[in-house]
Amino acid sequence: MIEAVLEKMEIKKQVFQELSGVVPARTVLATNTSALSVSEIAKAAKDPSKVIGFHFFNPAHRMPLVEVVVTPMTSKETIVTSLAFARRLGKTPILVKDTCGFIVNRILLGYINEGGRLLEECGDMAAIDKVMTDFGMPMGPFTLSDEVGLDVGIKVLYTLEESFGARFKPVDSFKRILDAKLLGKKTKKGFYLYHKGKEREVNPAIQPLLGPVRSGSFHAEDYLKRMLYLMINEAARCLEDGVVDDSGAIDVGMIYGTGFPAFRGGLLRYADSVGIGNIVS
């Protein structure tokens, strides 16, 4: 059983408490949360050993990745059942420890937030997006934000900030854009305006919400490094924290969960190709 109710802990816990009272004892109860503590959700269930995270990516019918999130209470039987089920769905599962944002959202939301800092500096979202698509990403940070919904992204950033501190604090312009209800594709107005079909254009309402743009110049190579190296740094932290047990799992997660260009071998393989000394310096 997989739930995908609102990202509110009290609602998740209520669902798991009620469900665990009516399903057969052998049932695996999975949550599709993108950032909330699976361990905390599991405490509400009758048998926490049967609770696991099963995090799909948007759009779920197209994205092949599933993060299978394990708590200290999750039984081996539950893990094996969940991995087998993910493969039966035709998905690629990676096993991750229960920690805020897991792997992909923790890396990705920091990248979107860095895109916001760049936007406040140069004021050109289309050019920033193009830097990333030229690199090989399927979409840049603002197109991605519109796809996910700025309200969802900011909620996850706040959750990450609570766990990891100021580096995940949402940029001020994001809050103003959220207050203006420019949420993205679902409202047809976000960083871009969405028309019938696939047509879109830069939303002119964004510019006044950025505040004074600090620089008129655009530095494509520096901007690319700032976005990529921030992701690499966060990926290294995920390894340091033991969220996954090897760098290959992060590379698989980024390729299948975000569309990171496979020809570059994955995020950390790309870091090796640049040279870790260059990245550190």
Image: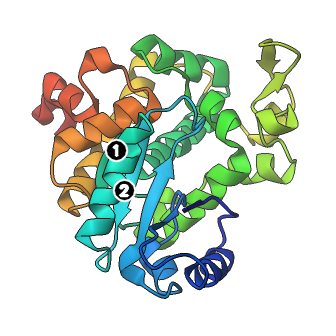
Report the colour scheme: rainbow
- Between 215 and 170, the one lying in front of the other is 170
C-alpha gap between disc 1 and disc 2: 9 Å
Q: Of helix, strand and loop, which one carries label 1?
A: strand
Which quarter of the figure has residue 201?
top right
Q: Residue at x 80, y 41 (%)?
A: 209
Image quadrant where one finds the C terminus: top left
Q: Residues within 10 Å of mark 1 (few under 14, many from 20)?
A: many
Is residue 141 something one can see in this rendering? yes
Q: Residue at x 45, y 79 (%)?
A: 25
Judge left or right: residue 53 versus residue 31: left
Judge left or right: residue 211 versus residue 34: right
- In the rendered image, which residue does mark 1 sit on? 93
Chain-order first, disc 1 or disc 2: 2
Marker disc for residue 82: 2
Q: Amino acid at mark 1?
A: Pro
Tell me where residue 15 appears, x and y as whole percent: 65, 76
Q: Are marks 1 and 2 in contact (CB under 8 Å)?
A: yes
Tell me where residue 127 appears, x and y as whole percent: 60, 17
Q: Amino acid at mark 2?
A: Ser
Q: Residue at x 83, y 23 (%)?
A: 194
Which quarter of the figure has residue 248?
top left
Marker disc for residue 281: none
Image quadrant where one finds the N terminus: bottom right
Tell me where residue 139 appears, x and y as whole percent: 55, 23
Q: Nearer the viewer, mark 1 or mark 2?
A: 2
- Between 167 and 53, the one lying in front of the other is 53
Q: Of helix, strand and loop, which one carries label 2?
A: helix
